[in-house]
Amino acid sequence: MTDLTGKTALVTGASRGIGRAIAERLASDGARVAVHYGSNEAAAKETVAAIESAGGQAFSVRADLGVDGDVDTLFDGLTAGLAGDPLDILVNNAAIMIYEATLPDATPEQFERLFAVNVRAPFFIAQRTLPLLADGGRIINISSGVTWFATPQTVYAMTKGALNAFARSAANSLGSRGITVNTISPGVTDTDMNGWLHETDDAAPGIAALTALERVGRGPDIADTVAFLASADGRWVTGQTLEVNGGLFLGPKSQAW
């Protein structure tokens, strides 16, 4: 297990899914975690309670991302919770999906909403973090495998591609402070966003059949990689996109010739 004792972390979108798994893992490694949520206060309280019942430290911070003043609201709550301590780890996890935002059907409103939450918010959260972020700190963005395999949800894929590009440039800019910036690109993971995995009996098995490790991803699979990048063990990794997907779409499992 990695050691984050004495560290502080902000995880956006941490009330459920991958974000909750990340918050719980970082807390189990010793970090005090700011659990950001947008609207589901009950879920955020459950995350904080789970962390505390396991012996960790956490507090919740509410901010609706993608609206005017979102970063100000977030950092008002964050700085109050930190009580003068620096921030060591930022995990930009919060994101939305609009399944109807395809190339033929996406509306300007859907386009703007997706970019506001998935790109603008992480960028300006990172920018606002810089004065609080300790030298040697970590910025970790959660992207998606849709940056390298095709999906009908073109606009969502574009937003995640922007995060990949952001990490490379930011890593180069912040390297002089010892701050690493990386991106994790999950494959198909069992979360609320991917509720379609449970809509038919063959959805999850179908994804498992396309994956070398023969199952759908889970939140802790992603959280464990975040913990590595957040720890001292990840000190020499920066500007990278890590595909954490169990070997999704590696190709046929048997030769066809």
Image (spheres, rainbow, N blue to C red):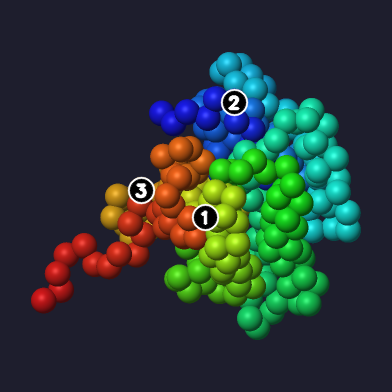
Q: Position of residue 10 (x, y in %)?
A: 67, 40
Q: CA distance from mark 3 to mark 1?
A: 25 Å
Tag nearer the camera, 3 or 2: 2
Q: Which residue is mark 1?
A: 182
Mark number displayed over residue 137: none
Quadrant location of the C terminus? bottom left
- Secondary element type, mark 1: strand
Helix, strand or loop under label 3: loop
Quadrant of the snapshot with the N terminus? top left
The amino acid on which the numbered mark 1 sits, given as a three-letter code, is Asn
Q: Position of residue 187 (x, y in %)?
A: 45, 56
Tell me, yes or no, if residue 117 can be seen here: no
| x and y percentages locating residue 216 in the rendered image | 41, 49
Secondary structure at numbered mark 2: loop
Query: Alpha-carbon distance for marks 1 and 2?
Result: 22 Å
Q: Amino acid at mark 3?
A: Arg
Please tell me which residue is depicted at 43% across the width and 56% down the height of the picture: 242
Q: CA distance from mark 3 to mark 2?
A: 35 Å
Viewer-nearest of labels 3 and 1?
1
Q: Nearer the viewer, residue 175 or 21?
A: 175
x then y, percent, for residue 241 = 46, 60
Which numbered circle lies on residue 6?
Answer: 2
Q: Amino acid at mark 2?
A: Gly
Which of 152 and 33 lies nearest the eye of the viewer? 33
For this view, does 163 lie left or right of residue 252?
Answer: right
Q: Residue at x 80, y 44 (%)?
A: 74
